[in-house]
Image (cartoon, grey):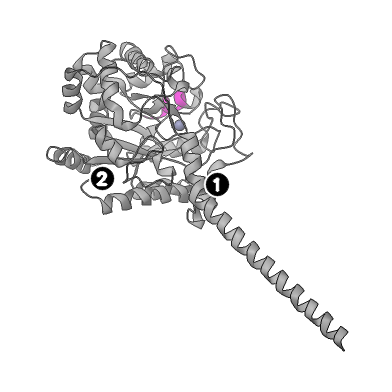
Amino acid sequence: MSNLICVLNLQVIYILKVKLLIKTLVVFIALLLIAVFLFVPSYIDNQKNVVLENVSLPEVSPEALDLHQSLVIGDWHSDSLMWSRDLMKENRVGHMDIPRLQKGNVALQMFTTVTKAPSGLNYETNDANTSDDITKLALVSLWPTKTWTSLTERSLYMSARLHSLAEENPKDLAVVTSKKSLSEVIERRKTNTKLVGALLGTEGSHALDGDLNNIEVLYDNGFRMMSLHHFFDNKLGGSLHGIKGGGLTEFGREAVKQMDQLNIIIDVAHSSEKVVEDVLALTDRPLVVSHTGFYGHCASPRNIPDNLMIQIANEGGLIAVGYWDGAVCEPTLESIAKSIDYGVNLVGADHISLGSDFDGSTEVPFDTSKMIYLTQALMDVGLSDENIAKVMGGNMLRFLEENLPD
Ligand SMILES: [Zn+2]
């Protein structure tokens, strides 16, 4: 009898031990998941979007300060909406948020939405079908489940983020979607220099999920610029860093025509040379290269040949110079200024703009709060005040005034 009690006791102790083990395991997994969701997105952001240390910054003169305050500053390319940080707070991570835009005296910022990126991105050749890091980012960043499988939904999610920030902070941020809303921002900035006008663009038209109807869906959600490609070939045609380097497909031609009809600005950054040629032949509207360098200044596979840049400018287009090594070779203020100066000499000051690629997994010499240093660097390279005003944002403002829908 006592043996039986002993066996029963042992069984009870065993069951209790197993239960405790399961409980401990569940708590451990829960803590691990919380740690993943809390820290991993911020860790990746911090690793990918670097402000380089030990970069020499020019001495800012009183003349540069005066000029900088008088400028309407605009930037054609920032991927900040992809990261989890609160963009209404000044962050120590990444390149951009609204307080830092305000410190930099930035009036107009294009926010571009990255929706797919195969692992191991490079400027030579990338295969879209191998992997996608944005799916992993969507999972760890707890984006809505719809975004896990749809690239259109990823763009819509980032657009919704921008719109709700603007609704909650109307004195700091306004979404620009038309000539009218653009002129309102410029008018309001006369008494409130903290107001930032934000625009929405896609980075690659794989964001259409292969469906032309999604052009209108994105337009209805505020998108006014669409780039055709990112790092890989898509249904529209070849990427500059894809496999085939092909031109526009029939689907691509239809997409360009529909974008034209809706007055959506077409961005050919990352598109193959053949696609750029095809788009130039197909449309009468001016193009934008939202973030690039010049091959003649920096012979990088990221930059298309100068003769294409000249054609884009001749059709009224804008070429927006970036700040990272792939675009300007040396990620220094001097090299960025030299690239801009090279562009001014090549295509004329009316066709050069800024395209930082801030928060686009780039390493840059300054964040957006330090734009004053770029003004100084452009003075140092010998650009006139008039041309600096055009490059820093005057051209972007004019282009938007002419090309946004009424
Ligand atoms: Zn890019």
Disc 1 marks which amino acid?
Answer: Thr
Residue 288 sits in quarter? top left
Location of mark 1 (residue) = 135
Residue 292 magenta-drawn? no
Residue 281 magenta-drawn? yes
Q: Position of residue 236 (x, y in %)?
A: 51, 36
* Element class at badge 1: helix
Relative placement, left or right, of 5 versus 46 is right
Over which residues does the magenta segment extend? 276-283
Residue at (37% x, 52% y) in the render: 160
Q: Position of residue 70 (x, y in %)?
A: 16, 27
Between 210 and 380, which is closer to the camera in this rendering?
380
**Is residue 109 something that shows in the picture?**
yes
Q: Are marks 1 and 2 in contact (CB under 8 Å)?
A: no
**Crowding at mark 2 (Cα within 10 Å: few <14, some 14-19, many 20+):** many
Between 214 and 320, which is closer to the camera in this rendering?
320
- Numbered tag placed on residue 8 in the rendering: none
**For the C terminus, which image quadrant?**
top left
Residue at (40% x, 31% y) in the render: 357
Residue at (42% x, 51% y) in the render: 157
Q: Residue furthest bottom?
A: 1
Location of mark 2 (residue) = 173
